[in-house]
Amino acid sequence: MTDIESRIDTSRPHTARIWNYWTGGKDNYPVDREAGDRIRELHPGIGAYAKADRLFLGRAVRHLAEHEGIRQFLDIGTGLPSADNTHEVAQSIAPDARVVYVDNDPLVLAHARALLVGTPEGRTDYLDADLRDVDTILAAAAKTLDLAQPVALMLLGVVIFVEDDEESYAIVRRLMDALAPGSHLVLSHTVTHPDMADVDAAVAFWNEHGTPRLTQRTPAAVARYFDGLDLLEPGVVSCSAWRPETATPDVAMYAGVGRK
């Protein structure tokens, strides 16, 4: 058994693998599918969140590459490879785009080679690190990215795993402070709302049975991650409502894009 394989726990469901299951992927185990089905019973629409979040990623990256001139992307909390990964979207518009992926999930690491096949003109790299290891991430990313030039910081569905509010805000600030003016923050986050009791029940089930635990925040608390940045229209909204190509129902995953 390799070191990576020894780190993969198949006895408990894992969020990245359930996300993969909900989006039709095959990188999951029976325990993940069982938990995913149970969560979907509690909140039938939750499987749509994963798809809506992935579509938001594509629209945000496409906008930044095509209209904002961004050629560098730091994607933390990458998740398992899927269709339209950050480098695929960015390099389809700008073949010279550079992308650094960061994740600490051993299963993601095992599949990282699928994330590293980019265009000859561009470059993709992968870093095995935790979101909290800000200094490590920045030092390693600087080997591929020029941090003196604008970078898009991608934090999709990852700060939910930092339970302490102030710690989570501080991590995002430290990362953005290290990036050049013209950089952008792209962030999505599961929200709690009085009208979404079924979402709260699904999250409670997850935190009792799955790993890692996740933290919901209110829409206003999610908007706080963009303090000091210029929010792009339409602001912090359901990720399905961020510049959609077709009208789709809102989901309890809020997102926004802000410019430094």
Image (spheres, rainbow, N blue to C red):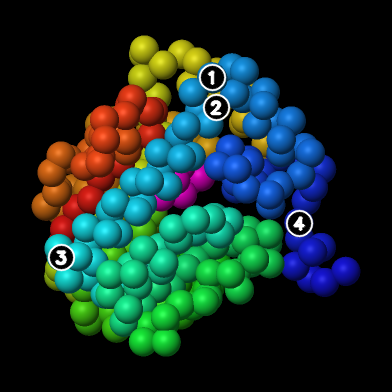
The answer to whether mark 4 and mark 1 are in CB contact below 8 A is no
Judged from the image, the secondary structure of the residue bearing numbered disc 3 is: loop
**Position of residue 236 in the picture relative to residue 202 (left or right):** left
The residue located at (68%, 67%) in the rendering is: 110
In the rendered image, residue 158 lying in the magenta stretch gets the answer yes
**Amino acid type of the residue tagged 2 in the rendering:** Val
What is the spatial separation of the Cα atoms under label 2 and label 3, in whole angstroms?
36 Å
Instruction: Write the start and end of the magenta stretch as one range.
Output: 156-162
Residue 106 appears in the figure: yes
Mark number, residue 203: 2
Q: Which residue is mark 3?
A: 68
The answer to whether mark 4 and mark 3 are in CB contact below 8 A is no
Q: Which residue is mark 4?
A: 8
Q: Is residue 68 above or below residue 17?
A: below
Counting residues from the start of the chain, the first of labels 4 and 3 encountered is: 4
**x%, y% of residue 200?**
49, 20
Q: Which residue is mark 1?
A: 43
Judged from the image, the secondary structure of the residue bearing numbered disc 2 is: helix
Residue 76 in which image quadrant:
bottom left
**Amino acid type of the residue tagged 1 in the rendering:** His
Residue 212 in which image quadrant:
top right
What is the spatial separation of the Cα atoms under label 2 and label 4, in whole angstroms?
22 Å
What is the spatial separation of the Cα atoms under label 1 and label 3, in whole angstroms?
37 Å
Mark number, residue 120: none
The residue located at (15%, 53%) in the rendering is: 229
Counting residues from the start of the chain, the first of labels 1 and 3 encountered is: 1
